[in-house]
Image: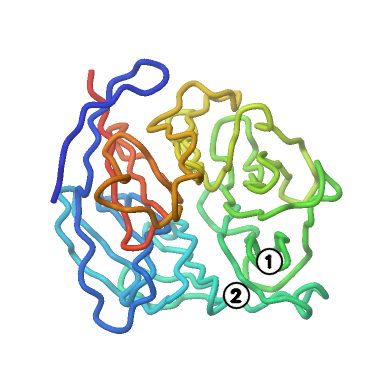
Amino acid sequence: MQTKTPLFSKSGRRWIWHEGWAALPEPMLGVRNLRTHGVKVLADGRIVVFHQATPSVLIYDRDGRLQSRFGAYPGAHGLTLVRRAGADLLWLTDEILGAVDLVDLEGRVHMRLEKPSHPACRDSTFAPTWVAEQADASGNPLRLWVADGYGAMLVHAFDSHGRYEFTLDGTTGAGRFHHPHGLAVDPREGKDQRLLVADRGNRRVQEFAGDGRFLGSWGEEFLIHPNGFDFRNGHCVISELHGRLTVLDERNQPVDFIGDQPNARFLTGWPDVNRAQLLQPGFFNSPHHACWGPDGEIYAVEWVKGGRLIRLEPAG
């Protein structure tokens, strides 16, 4: 059931919190836990949700009506939207299957990245969490990046044909990665498509050039558990797993915190808390991913058994 709740973010901006703006359908096959892990808005305004059930990819219209669903990814995790030749495509990662697939909106697989040949991957489970893609001005891919965030805790580089090239471990940067979870290529002016790594366990973001050179790190003084990124009009929204969304300006400085529940991770049974008593509108529990909509709204999904879908609409 959808509810609408007024909310003031930390900056004093007013939002309308739409709890359950769309409903998760009953799975067609066996289900793991329905946890919602990824969300993106397509060029035509439809919303994609990636969750741990079969089918795994859900496409909704803006009114929350389910349009289509496809894919069998029991460990559904990272969702990245790319546009090639005028068409929306999705990079999907599955932490259980070790799958890294590029699919179209009908679920056809256009590319599959194999487990990298890095020595560390022979000694640990390959558990990919996110993909980022650097492209030229026409949208043609130049380099693909894959975070092995729950395996060897590395970030792997592939060429545009999906051939493994090299690996980053953070030691040439701010320090060894600890759960390098989310990845993004910064599209903002002057950022030169630098790779952003949500070094979640270290509560920071590390930046790298397209050739893997370390460019810097930031966020240690204000991030609590950075999970992933999305961009609009020079701003970046970061989902923070320990209970809030953080909005940054062009200088990567915080300008707002939304739905902050700073003690979320200390709730009994977190993240799978008592839904009726503790998943309250206006407060995040475990936001796994968030993205901007075309009118400045924000869609967020939470890492919680049974899933949670939230839309934040700016008001005034």
Is residue 135 at all visible to an observer of this figure?
A: no
Is residue 145 at all visible to an observer of this figure?
A: yes
- Within 10 angstroms of label 1, few (less than 14), some, or many (20 or more) residues? many
Residue located beneath label 2 in the image: 113
Q: Are marks 1 and 2 in contact (CB under 8 Å)?
A: yes
Q: Is residue 149 above or below residue 122?
A: above
Of all residues, the one furthest to the bottom in this rendering is: 29
Left/right placement of residue 252 relative to residue 35 reads right
Q: Secondary structure at mark 1?
A: strand
**Residue at 63% over, 47% down:** 200
Residue type (three-letter) at the residue carrying disc 2: Leu
Q: Compare marks 1 and 2 and give the one earlier in the sequence.
A: 2
Of all residues, the one furthest to the front in this rendering is: 268
**Residue at 51% over, 71% down:** 94
Could you say which is closer to the camera, residue 85 or residue 195? 195
Residue located beneath label 1 in the image: 158
> How many numbered circles are shown?
2
